[in-house]
Image: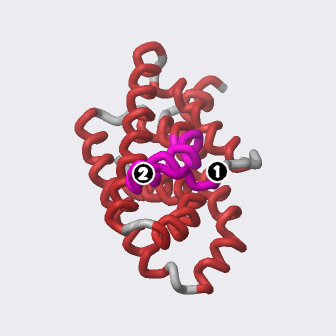
Amino acid sequence: MNYWLLTLTFLSVNLDFFFMLLFLLKKYDVVKVMIGYLLGNLIMLGVSYAVGKALLIFLPEWVLGILGILPIYLAFHDDDDDNQDRHHRSQILSVTLTYLSVCAGCNLSIFLPVLVGESAAHFLITLMFIGSLTILVVVVIKLIAQLPIVTSLMAKYGERLMKVCYVLIGLWVFWDSGLINHIIAFF
C-alpha cells in the first residue's frame, strides 16, 4: 500500500470539494460536516473497492491498469459539476449528499484503479487512513477558512493542481498494475 499515492489521490479527488467545505463549515456544525464528509468518503471508497474486486474476477490486474486512463481523461476534461448545496433537515445528510453529488464520478474513476489490487486487510487500513485524512482536512479547512490568501490561491491555482495530480495518479496506475511491463514485454 502506497500512502503517498493514497494521500495524493485523496487530495486531488477532493480538491474541488474543499471549496464546498469552506461554505459548509460556515453554514453547519463542524462535527456534523465532519461526519457527513466522512460518510460520503467511506461510501465512495466502498463502491470503488467492490467494483474493482468484481472486475478482478474477470480480468487480470495488469489489464485493469488501463483504468489509469480515467484520471488522465478527467485531467483534460472540463467538468461542469453542480456545486449547489442540497437542502435537507439533517446537516449530516446534506453534507453527505452534497459530497456525493459533487465528487461521485471523480471518486469512482480515480479510486477504482488505485484500490483494484488491494486485499481486504489493506482496504480496511485504507479506510482508516482516508478517514483520518478526511477528519484532518475538515479541521485544517475550518482553521484556514478565514484566511483570504488561501481562498485566493485555491481559486487561482486549484484547478491546475488538481489536473496535474490526476495525470500523476493515472501514470502511477499504469506502472503499479504491471500494464507498462506487459506492454514493454510485448515489444
Q: Report the quarter where the C terminus lies.
A: top right
How far apart are the alpha carbons under marks 1 and 2?
38 Å
- Seen from the viewer's position, the closer of residues 161 and 89 is 89
What's the residue at 62%, 43% (across, down)?
71
Please identify the residue farthest to the top as the structure is shown.
58
What is the count of numbered marks?
2
| Crowdedness near tag 2: few (<14), some (14–19) or many (≥20) residues, C-alpha within 10 Å | few
Res. 163 image quadrant: bottom right
Stretch of the chain drawn in magenta: 84-107
Labelled pair 1, 2 in contact (Cβ < 8 Å): no
Q: Which residue is mark 2?
A: 89
Which sits in the foreground, 13 or 103? 103
Q: Is residue 186 above or below residue 108?
A: above
Most foreground residue, 165 or 95: 95
Q: Which residue is at a point 70% across and 63% down the rendered structure image? A: 160
Furthest residue in direction left, as rendered: 121
In the rendered image, residue 91, in percent from the top left (x then y), is placed at: 40, 56
Q: Amino acid at mark 2?
A: Arg
Q: Is residue 99 left or right of residue 74?
A: left
> Who's the residue at 50% across and 36% down the image?
113
Residue at (50, 33) in percent of width and height = 178
Task: Tell me where residue 167 appears, x and y as whole percent.
Answer: 64, 50
According to the picture, the residue beneath numbered tag 1 turns out to be 167
Residue type at numbered disc 1: Val
Q: Is residue 95 magenta?
A: yes
Residue 81 horizontal side relative to residue 3, left or right? right
